[in-house]
Amino acid sequence: MGNYHTADRSGVTINDESLDFLHKADRDALHTRFEVGSLRATAHFLWEVDFSPYILRTRLNRCLMAKGLHTIIAFDAQLDRPLLLKAIWLVDTQQWTEVVNALKLAEQRGCCTLPVTMSVQDIQRHTTKQAYLAEPRVVALWKMIGRQVNFGGNCGRFELFDQQGGGVRALRDEPGFELTISPPLPPTHPYHPHMINNNPPVRSRIRLLPGSWTADSEMVTYASASAFIMEKIMLGSPVAHRAKTPWVHVDRYAHGGVLSGLLNRSPHQPPNRCTAVVAFRYDDMNPPLEGRILLLTSFDMPFIAWVVLGSSADTTIVGVSVITTEPPVGGASDASKDRRPTTAPLVRSLLGNPIADMALNQKEQAT
C-alpha cells in the first residue's frame, strides 16, 4: 500500500487493507503511533523516502517541542540525514525524565547552560540502535549527554567511559572509577523489590574530596543510575555559601513517625514537597548504613537545599542534617534557621517543627 491521506486517526486498516505507512499533508509531519495504529514498513519507508536534512530537522524540532525538550536539549546543526533520523528516534521514542531532571539540576548548580547541544560525536556514541538498546536507557542516554555537565577545575566533565571488554567508568577513565551496573542484589536487599530495568542500581567507589574526585575504599550501592548521577551533580565542585547543620539523632518512630515514613518510601519516589530523592547504601559496612538525600528546592530556585537521613538496621535512631547553598544573612554565629530564612520553612514542611527545630537551631558547619 502506498501513500494515503486520511482523517481516520485510529483505524488499523483502510479499505480492508493493512497499513504499511502513512504520509501526511505536511512533508515533515511524519505519522505518530496514535495516528497509525499498525506499521509494518516504517523504518524502510523513512530510509528510502528522500527527506532532505531541512525536512528532517524541522521534524526533529517538532518532536522536541512535543516532548517539552526544546528548552533542555538541542542538536548540532551539522547532523547529516542518518544522524537526524537517529535523533528523531531518540527524542520521539525514549523517556528523558531522569536525564532532564539531572540537566536541570546541573544548570542550577552552574555546571551547564540549557539547552545543551548534542554534537555529532554525542549522537555517534552508540554505533547502532541495537548497541543503544543493549544498555539500560538512563546509562545509554547519559553516555551521550553527560559530558555536557562540566564541574570545572580538576573535577572535569561528567563523562562515562566505555572499557575494552565491557564495563564503564565514570568521571575519570582511571582504575577505581568503575561503575557496576545492575549488581546482583540478594532478595533481602532493600532495593531488590524496587529494581527498574531501564534505571537499575549501580555500585561505585567514587567520592569527592576537596577539589577532585577520588576512588574510595568503601563501595556504595545506589538505588538507580539516576540516583548516582543526581548525587554527583549535587555534591560535585565547590559552591558558594554551602553549609550544613551538625547531625542530630532522632528515633525514627518519634514525633509521629515522620522519619520512618520517609525511609519506608520507595527509593525512587520523592516524598511530597520534595523534588528528587537519592537513595544509597554502604553494603559492606556491618551493619550496612543506608542514606536518603531529599531535595527540597525546585529546579527553578536560585539555590539548592536538601535533607540527608542516615540509618542502619541495628538501631531505630536516624541521623538528620540539612545542607543548603542559600546566601546567608546575619552573623556566622547565628542559628541556621536565621541564617537561611528561605531554607528553614522547606525543612519544617518536610520534617515537622520538632525535628526541624533540632536541626535548624544549631550553628552551621562549612562543607
Image (cartoon, grey):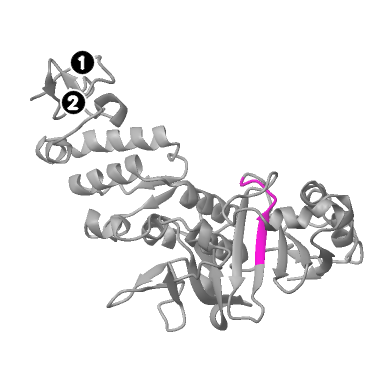
- Give percent across and percent down for residue 94: 36, 45
**Relative to 248, does residue 94 appear above or below in the rendering?**
above
- Which quadrant would the N terminus be assigned to in this image? top left
- Give percent across and percent down for residue 199: 45, 57
Label pair 1/2, CB-CB below 8 angstroms: yes
**Relative to 101, does residue 124 appear above or below in the rendering?**
below
User: Of the residues under marks 1 and 2, which one precedes in the sequence?
Assistant: 1
Q: Is residue 108 left or right of residue 297?
A: left
User: Within the magenta stretch, is there residue 295?
Assistant: yes
User: Which residue is pictured at 37% across the width and 59% down the height?
Assistant: 136
Q: Secondary structure at mark 2?
A: loop
Question: Which amino acid type corresponds to the residue marked 1 in the rendered image?
Answer: Thr
User: Within the magenta stretch, is there residue 29?
Assistant: no
| Residue sitting at the far front | 187
Looking at the rendering, which quadrant does residue 218 occupy?
bottom right
Question: Which amino acid type corresponds to the residue marked 2 in the rendered image?
Answer: Leu
Reading the image, the residue beneath label 2 is: 22
- Give percent across and percent down for residue 42: 17, 36
Residue 6: mark in rendering: 1
- Give percent across and percent down for residue 195: 48, 58
- Residue 42 vs residue 288, the one in the foreground: 288
Label 1: few (<14), some or many (≥20) within 10 Å? Answer: few
Q: Magenta stretch?
A: 291-299
**Relative to 314, does residue 362 appear above or below in the rendering?**
above
Q: Secondary structure at mark 1?
A: loop
Q: Is residue 125 left or right of residue 325?
A: left
